[in-house]
Image: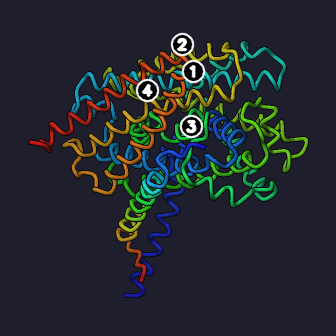
Amino acid sequence: MGSSTRTRNRFSVSRVKSFLSYMGPSWVAGAIAAGPATMGSLITGGGAFDYALFWVVVLSAVAGAFTQYLAMRLGLLTERGIIGVVENHLGNTWAWLLVLDVVIAAGIAQLLIMKTVASVSATVTGVDSRIWGVMWALVLAVGLATRGYRFLEVIAKTLVSGIVVVFVASLFIVPIDPGAAVSGLVPSLPSGSALVAAGILGGAVHITLITMHSYTMRTREWTADDYDLATFDVITSMLVAFGIYSVAIYLVTASVLTTGNLSTVEAAQALGPFAGRFAEWLFLLGLWGAAVSTLGGNTIVPPFLLADKLGWGTTVADDRYRWLLVAAALLSAPGAFIDGPILSQLALVLAIGTVGTPFAIAIVLYLLNSPAVPESNSTIANLVGLALLFVSGTLAANFVREQVAMGIGPLSGAILSFALILTVATVGVFIKYVQQEGMFA
Amino acid sequence: MAAIGAPLFAVFLWGSMLGVLLVFAYECYVFALDSGIRLT
């Protein structure tokens, strides 16, 4: 009996080891989540509001892991891309609405990520950022169409890992105030913090990440048999790795920086206590790495959904998908021509993404309780899913209210319209669910 | 500092996060059973 258990344990240990070598799809989502916009939001939040938004930082890692877990369940139990499932079980209009939601949220993010790559490249080389924008768009288009971009992403991820290590190491050097950090776990939104709070949560719980998961798992040919591996993949990437990344950056900047309206050079001062005169270079390389790896990951998502909706293949083996990728890459070039301070604009982009996210969560929850999947969600998973839908909806609503309170202009008007359409759509999903279940009949 | 919903929201928020950890713990438990790992 004992030896049989040991044999099983040995088998399990080797299984865990093989898990490590096969992990993937959720790490792609984690790499996008740990992008420059999240970094910008964390730094702006820590600089402007000290430890007060620490609860949002912890929430973002937990909620990000859970929404990826729900997306993973849906992807594995249906063994299809999310758009095809929505089309079959909710209808054509809903599928198009979800595609549109992703194209808008990921498209706006793409422009600002390109701006970050281009302007950091310009700072380092002295060559105009607009020239860099066009060059990077071409590199991205050719690289994604031929898979050559993966090489660049490996370098970028190494740089991001490096900066995370520096932030974690800084945690032991800078004077963190543990009492203030613990009191930051009590939820509160200081005046003017709604945008950055929505940005921090939006970095982890984002429609782009939720919808891409089914496609990246399909690329790996994962099926329901890989359920354990996929769960392990989600927990290690989003809860553990992304959690450490967010908490380290936030606590260090909350401790060192005193303002949220920062240039990249000012933000680099957060690394000063550890890196000294190399702080600026380290920070710029980390920001560049985060932007390059997120740029590649983010570009593939709208083409995934659009190709699925049009009935095309979702790998470069299908030429139509390949051209969609090229178009998405080239369309990001105008991002380099946008003026203004990068870090706060990045937070704004994620906050806009947060407005689009509750609809995606509602769709995933609906499908996980519909005939689309062979086994329904557990009650606790449904309750937690609804709670996170409520929390992300509340943060998104606070952000929209703060934008509208500053007066209705082209930007705030567009954000308000986006929010209203998606609120109606989210309520519509609930009505469809109630109709389907005949709950009140 | 404007607390949103005060203590009730805090309980709701942290209760939800505890719920997430419970779901993950359950998945790990099922994984352990499937793999033949015994805790006792």
Instruction: Categorize mark 2 by other alpha carbons within 10 Å: few (<14), some (14-19), many (20+).
Output: few
Chain letter for the residue marked with disc 1 in the picture: A
Residue A151 visible in rendering: no
SS for dot 1: loop
| Nearest-to-viewer mark from 2 and 1 | 1
Residue type at numbered disc 2: Gly
Q: Quadrant of the N terminus of chain A?
A: bottom left
Tell me: A138 left or right of A304. Answer: right
In contact (CB < 8 Å): disc 2 and disc 1: yes
Q: Are marks 2 and 4 on the same chain?
A: yes
The answer to whether marks 2 and 3 mark residues whose Cβ atoms lie closer than 8 Å is: no
Q: How many marks?
A: 4
Q: Residue at x 36, y 71 (%)?
A: B33
- Residue A270, position in %: x, y? 79, 43
Specify the amino acid type for callout 1. Met
Q: Which residue is mark 2?
A: A409
Q: Disc 1 designates what residue?
A: A406
Report if residue A370 is visible in the image.
yes
Location of residue A335 by image quarter: top right
Task: Bin the neighbour count of mark 1 within 10 Å (Cα to Cα): few under 14, some 14-19, many 20 and up.
Answer: few
Q: Which of pointers 2 and 4 lies earlier in the amino acid sequence?
A: 4
Nearest to viewer (mark 2 / mark 4): 2
Kindly identify the amino acid type of the residue bearing the numbered disc 4: Val
Q: Are there few (<14), some (14-19), or many (20+) residues within 10 Å of tag 3?
A: many
Q: Residue at x 34, y 48 (%)?
A: A73
> Image quarter for residue A121?
top right
Does label 4 lie on the same chain as label 1? yes
SS category of the residue bearing label 4: helix
Marks 1 and 4, how far apart in space? 26 Å
